[in-house]
Image: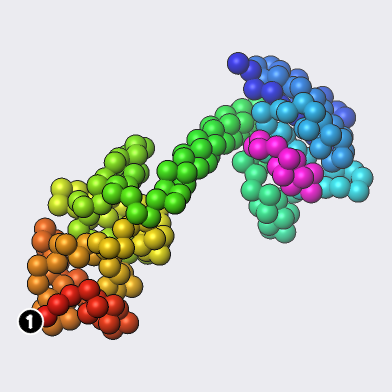
Amino acid sequence: MAVNILVTEDESIVRKDIEKTLQKLGYNVVGTADTGEKAIELASSLKPDLALMDIMLKGTMTGIEAADKIKRNIDIPIIFLTAYADEKTLAKAKITEPHGYILKPFKEIDIQTSIEIAIHKHKKESELKVENELLRSLTRHKNDADYLFVKNKSRLVKLNTSEVIVVEALKDYVVINTLEDKYTIHSTMKDIERKLPDHVFQRVHRSFIVNMDKVEAIQAANLILTGYDKDVPIGGSYRESISDRINVL
């Protein structure tokens, strides 16, 4: 199915040239505008798949301002058209997070490549949003659950919490270690700690959460865990809470 495109360009000759080029490439031009205000109106009523937007428009509103308002109303990719490639203009344009940037004068291949990349990127972003929302709904209010769903190679893998040996922080990620595998996910230790059953798991260091059932020995200031080949350090601020959970003879 042809991609529906809204074109906003205040130079009529350039606008018609863009429209002909798009039609030649097999795209459907659902509307054209010469002002930011008109572009916002058409975007709201026509719901295009993509908008080509000139940055410098005549009138009271720039293409950047119009793009920002459009993206607040409908989730579509926007590609800026401009004859200006200076750093100041680019910095302003980046604020709206466009999916492309085409410099005038442009060739057919420039427009086609930018549109196809923008459509593909936006599709992947939309799929990721849906996936993230699913993840949030699955984990909402489940802090006492006996299992987790962990993202692994585009799949959500069911993981029993009893299989987890230790969770280790790694910059903006955490590594969930089991006897059989490791799962690296984008999360925080605080979020993981909240979702693991607290009667089994204990934060022992700013970088480690351990399954207390897997602790087989304590040596100096380290925990030795079954199925884990590294000693886990005990952080000073966590020693008291760990002591409250164990009996020493």
Is 125 located above or below residue 116 in the figure? Answer: below
Name the residue: 72% across, 44% down.
Answer: 72
Give coordinates of residue 193: x percent, y percent. 36, 62
17 sits left or right of 229 in the view: right
- Mark 1 nearby-residue class (10 Å; few <14, some 14–19, many ≥20): few
Placement of the N terminus among the 4 image quadrants = top right
Residue 121 appears in the rendering: no
Viewed as shown, does residue 10 lie left or right of 222? right
Horizontal relation, residue 8 to residue 126: left or right: right
Q: Judging from the image, what secondary structure is the residue with disc 1 in?
A: loop
- Quick check: can you spot residue 35? yes
Q: Looking at the image, which residue is at 79% across and 48% down?
A: 65
Vertical comparison of 249 with 225: above or below:
below
Residue at (73% x, 28% y) in the render? 47
Residue 14: percent from left, percent from top = 81, 30
Q: Magenta span covers which residues?
A: 65-77
Q: Position of residue 188 (x, y in %)?
A: 40, 61
Extreme residue in the right direction: 59
Q: Tell which of 175 and 214 is nearer to you.
A: 214
Magenta-highlighted stretch: main secondary structure?
Answer: helix
194, 124: nearer the viewer: 194
Q: Quadrant of the C terminus?
A: bottom left
**Residue 214 falls in which quadrant of the image?**
bottom left
For badge 1, the amino acid type reads: Leu
> Is 73 one of the magenta-colored residues?
yes
Identity of the residue drawn at 85% across and 28% down: 13
